[in-house]
């Protein structure tokens, strides 16, 4: 009995630490978004760690402003995706892929285009995600019509409860 209580306390402490870390990350979003202001408005930005050439953009500050405008929502979407337990959370994959594509596109060497062909990349992903979500929804409402369960009980049934972030990542691959 004492051992079970000890495990419960350890699980609570681990959950509290993860929750506190997520709260700190979310609370620091305004600070993270303003980080681009510390970047100079020059074509080449040199630090003791690296040198960044903004090439076609010709302004490192502008590139970092666009980057933070893409990376911050991506970060928040990833947090939402990995912490959400609702059956529909797979729909978040579409904007996650969209923002990821836009970030890679931002740092593309050619940079003759920006955000032009993202629908071509998103179509195959949407072709998989949207019907999957619809099938899960149809299965849920079929169970509602054939059973005396409430929508909340069915949502609880479809909830995914992995033990940690790594097990949740492994669940998708």
Image: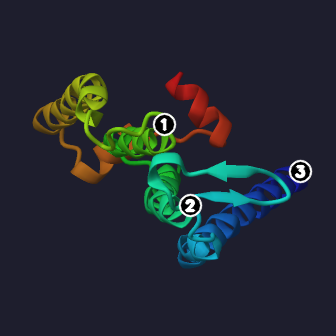
- Distance (Cα) linking label 2 and label 3: 56 Å
Q: Nearer the viewer, residue 11 or 166?
A: 166
* Model colouring: rainbow
Tag 1, which secondary structure? loop
Q: Are marks 2 and 3 in contact (CB under 8 Å)?
A: no
State which tag comes first along the sequence, 2 or 3: 3
Res. 108 mark: 1
Q: Crowdedness of circle 1 by 10 Å Cα count: few (<14), some, many (20+)?
A: few
Q: Which mark is residue 120?
A: none
Secondary structure under badge 2? Answer: helix
Q: Is residue 65 left or right of residue 2?
A: left
Name the residue tied to disc 3: 3
Of labels 1 and 3, the one closer to you: 1
* Residue 80 visible within the image: no
Q: Quadrant of the C terminus?
A: top right
Provide residue 58's location: percent of width, then percent of height.
50, 57
């Amino acid at each position: 009995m004492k051992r079970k209580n000890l495990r419960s306390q350890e699980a609570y402490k681990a959950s509290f630490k993860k929750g506190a870390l997520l709260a700190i990350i979310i609370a620091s979003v305004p600070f993270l978004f303003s980080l681009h202001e510390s970047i100079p408005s020059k074509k080449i930005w040199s630090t003791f760690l690296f040198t960044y050439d903004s090439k076609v953009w010709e302004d490192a500050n502008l590139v970092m402003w666009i980057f933070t405008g893409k990376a911050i929502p991506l970060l928040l979407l990833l947090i939402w995706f990995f912490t959400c337990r609702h059956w529909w959370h797979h729909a978040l994959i579409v904007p996650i892929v969209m923002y990821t594509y836009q970030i890679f596109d931002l740092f593309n060497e050619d940079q003759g285009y920006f955000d032009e062909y993202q629908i071509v990349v998103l179509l195959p992903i949407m072709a998989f995600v949207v019907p999957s979500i619809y099938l899960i929804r149809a299965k849920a409402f079929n169970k509602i019509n054939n059973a005396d369960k409430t929508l909340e009980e069915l949502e609880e049934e479809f909830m995914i409860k992995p033990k940690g972030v790594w097990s949740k990542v492994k669940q998708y691959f």
